[in-house]
Amino acid sequence: MKRVLMIRSIVLFALAIGIAQPSFAQRKDGATRPNFILIFTDDQGYGDLGTYGNPTIKTPNIDRLALEGQKWTNFYVAANVCTPSRAGLLTGRLPIRSGMQGEKKRVLFPDSKGGLPLSEITIAKLLKQNGYHTGIVGKWHLGSRPEFLPTKHGFDYYYGIPYSNDMDRVDSIPYVEAITQPKNEYFQVPLLQNEVVIEKPAIQNTLTERYTKEAVEFITKNKENPFFLYLAHSMPHVPLFANDKFKGKSARGIYGDVIEEIDWSVGEIVAALKKQGLDKNTYVVFVSDNGPWKIFKDLGGSSGPLYGAKGNSYEGGVRVPAVFWGPERVKPGQITEIGSTLDVLTTFASLAHTELPKDRVYDGYDLTGVLTGTQQKSPRDEMFYYHASQLVAVRKGPYKLSFYSNSEFAYPDQLSRLERPKLYNLNEDIGEANDIAEKHPELVKELSGLIEEHRKSVVPVVSQLDIP
């Protein structure tokens, strides 16, 4: 009896001076707030997964997520190339609002002086303020200078490469040779842990495997806390480096080998969640950063039924595979409504009961209702297509109005203003082949007006990509 009274006295004393209460509150919050895992691939096309119709690449783990969760068929990225796309994803804002678009350079390079401004609020920074543990594993590409690294943008932990895996190429090796016959020593891309270089050049054949190991360890270490994990794969961006465990296994060649290893990685992530009993308290999102790099032919991916590719704003350049999974949280089904990576921050904030700052313009919508099945129609009914800082097209409902043309393969850029805009009904013409502008002048006028209204909300800022 005396022992019980003594223990009770100690507990009451600890509560009175504020020692025991905070840790108890943290455990309670951690048990009720969901975890988030965002898996982002690099240059993977709309048609590169089994669930999106690929006949030769085997992706059973991702296909299972799509079957058990939601497969979105009208899902868009914020931009048609790496850097601005990633900026839009993590901030919920069009890249032109943060200066993460450029005219002279479309993406950041190792010698770039700019990066994602510290004034921007990333998903990691937002959730960390609400008690989340945050980690990024994989490719960053939002500034490689110390002041722009992930650890400065709300991430507690970073393991990965700071930019694309084809950068820091050895000058003596011609680019085409380095891409088509790659060796690790051809690229001096560093591998970082937090802010320290731990390997240079990065051994790329094993990056996906090591990313997966790091991701699983992050999940295990944070099983008692709410967490946000951003797993940004370096592949299938060229050069393609296949792991020996997957090399030669896919009927699609080395590109398929790389995708099938990424699918294996997804399986390992889900297995880790189930092992730790976290699967029913975690949202997993799988999406690509832009369309496939078709100029590399068999080393690039497929747009499936879409026209276009990485670097342009045809559907093949900006419409991407997107899967949302969360047992007992996400209502299974195929979603044909419009969604975007711009909506991820807003949706995560809603699911985590976190308020957005009121001091900036957000371009995202809350997709919670569609994910849970409480509403069928997406709050997003429009999409603005940017090519660098140039607004080239707009979509509202099924209709897309384009003001510029480009090469299907996008590189080199061949952007040119059309004599008159072209209008497509994407529900009926997914390949953007039939211009119906003359039949619907009222729609041309309506969508043109939508662009003018949008432009009024854009305040010019310094381009971080073009800083001399």
Image (cartoon, rainbow, N blue to C red):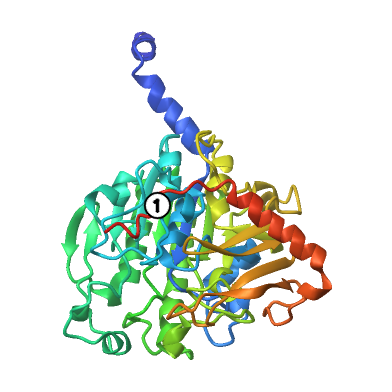
* Residue under the point 36% across and 79% down: 238
Query: In this view of the protein, which residue sits in the foreground, 410 or 157?
Result: 410
Does 406 sit above or below residue 440? Answer: below
The amino acid type found where label 1 is placed reads: Ile
- SS label for mark 1: helix
Query: In this view of the protein, which residue sits in the foreground, 245 or 146?
Result: 146
Query: In this view of the protein, which residue sits in the foreground, 108 or 303?
Result: 108
For disc 1, the marked residue is: 219
Q: Check the picture and name the quadrant holding the N terminus.
A: top left
- Res. 43 image quadrant: bottom left
Q: Residue furthest front?
A: 419
In the image, residue 299 lies at what x, y percent?
Answer: 41, 86
Q: Is residue 138 visible?
A: yes
Does 377 sit above or below residue 318? Answer: above
Q: Check the picture and name the quadrant holding the C terminus.
A: bottom left
In the image, residue 213 lies at what x, y percent?
Answer: 33, 62
* Residue under the point 26% across and 57% down: 144
- Res. 106 image quadrant: bottom left
Q: Is residue 331 visible?
A: no
Does 175 sit above or below residue 9? Answer: below
In the image, residue 118 lies at what x, y percent?
Answer: 34, 43
Please give left or right for residue 103 compared with residue 156 in the image.
Answer: right
Does 437 sit above or below residue 97? Answer: below
* Residue under the point 32% across and 50% down: 150
